[in-house]
């Protein structure tokens, strides 16, 4: 992951396509430690909307800087709110766009990943952390609690005891601790985090895109459904894929002993 040297005139998120069918979004407020202000979240939501609608994008790669993924919400913006104005805040609809992004997401995290930054990272389907990464929900130190899903997503990843320890103390956890609690999928040397995350994104992007999307849907629905309903939903999605050209191509490629070429149809 390369050093980020954006100026105030540069966009708060950068977009590029580093591999076939992979769209990379890089948080780009290095002087503000990639704090998630309204402008950044607005552009992030727009970039996600574009990627969701683009059939050429099959996997998203989300990155930050080499020393800070994102240090949390923008405290200066938060300080301007009161109990009334926070109810009219536009940011929840941008978080909704993050939450509802349908395609696979891989995140690469180096350095600090705190508060809203940790909440953003937890929306990734696969999270790769550098050895220096530090994760936390320190909102309690400001007299508030996580407000973009931190208490809920952390609970699913790490369980009640570890979630409450992080949320109630504000203490940070290391990359190794995050791996042990199930918050991240892999830990790499810092210099290799971006490359490893891109390798995973490239691998996913080469798979059948409809199957990848429905696999993600099936797993995430398990958080919202009783087991019996989730199993029925999984079976419906499984059956739906039998109508796709990609399913036919996958079987042909297997019998012909060649790599499949998926079209997303």
Image (tube, rainbow, N blue to C red):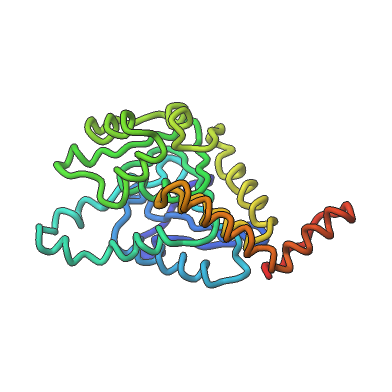
Give the vertical position of 162 relative to 227 (above or below): above
Front position in the image: 245 or 56: 245
Picture coordinates of residue 136, whole percent (x, y): 33, 37
Picture coordinates of residue 199, whole percent (x, y): 65, 46
For the C terminus, the quadrant is bottom right
Give the vertical position of 131 relative to 52 (above or below): above
217 relative to 21 in the view: left or right: left
Count of numbered badges drawn on the protein: 0
Give the vertical position of 263 relative to 160 (above or below): below
Question: Which residue is at 34% across, 64% downward?
Answer: 94
Q: In the figure, residue 6 lies in which quadrant? A: bottom left
Question: Which residue is at 41% across, 29% downward?
Answer: 174
Front position in the image: 158 or 201: 158
The residue furthest right is 256
Question: Which residue is at 40% across, 42% downward?
Answer: 68
Question: Which residue is at 65% across, 52% downward?
Answer: 202
Picture coordinates of residue 86, whole percent (x, y): 16, 60
Picture coordinates of residue 137, whole percent (x, y): 29, 39
Q: In the figure, residue 239 lies in which quadrant? A: bottom right
153 relative to 75 in the view: left or right: right
The residue furthest left is 83
Q: In the figure, residue 58 lies in which quadrant? A: bottom right
């Amino acid at each position: 992951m390369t050093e980020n040297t954006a100026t105030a005139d540069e966009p708060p998120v950068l977009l590029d396509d580093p591999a076939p069918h992979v769209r990379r979004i890089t948080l780009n407020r290095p002087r503000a430690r990639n704090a998630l202000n309204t402008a950044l979240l607005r552009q992030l939501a727009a970039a996600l909307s574009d990627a969701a609608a683009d059939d050429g994008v099959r996997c998203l790669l989300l990155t930050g800087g080499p020393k800070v993924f994102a240090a949390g919400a923008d405290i200066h913006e938060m300080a301007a709110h009161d109990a009334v104005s926070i109810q009219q805040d536009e940011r929840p609809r941008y978080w909704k766009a993050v939450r509802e992004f349908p395609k696979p997401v891989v995140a690469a995290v180096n350095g600090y990943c705190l508060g809203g930054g940790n909440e953003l990272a937890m929306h990734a389907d696969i999270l790769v952390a550098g050895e220096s990464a530090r994760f936390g929900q320190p909102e309690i130190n400001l007299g508030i609690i996580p407000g973009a899903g931190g208490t809920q997503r952390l609970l699913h990843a790490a369980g009640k005891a570890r979630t409450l320890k992080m949320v109630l103390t504000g203490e940070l956890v290391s990359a190794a601790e995050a791996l042990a609690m199930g918050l991240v999928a892999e830990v790499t040397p810092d210099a290799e985090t971006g490359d490893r995350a891109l390798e995973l994104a490239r691998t996913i992007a080469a798979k059948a895109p409809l199957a990848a999307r429905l696999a993600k849907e099936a797993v995430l629905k398990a958080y919202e459904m009783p087991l019996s309903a989730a199993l029925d939903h999984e079976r419906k999605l499984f059956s739906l894929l039998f109508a796709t050209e990609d399913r036919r191509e996958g079987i042909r490629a297997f019998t012909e002993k060649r790599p499949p070429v998926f079209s997303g149809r």
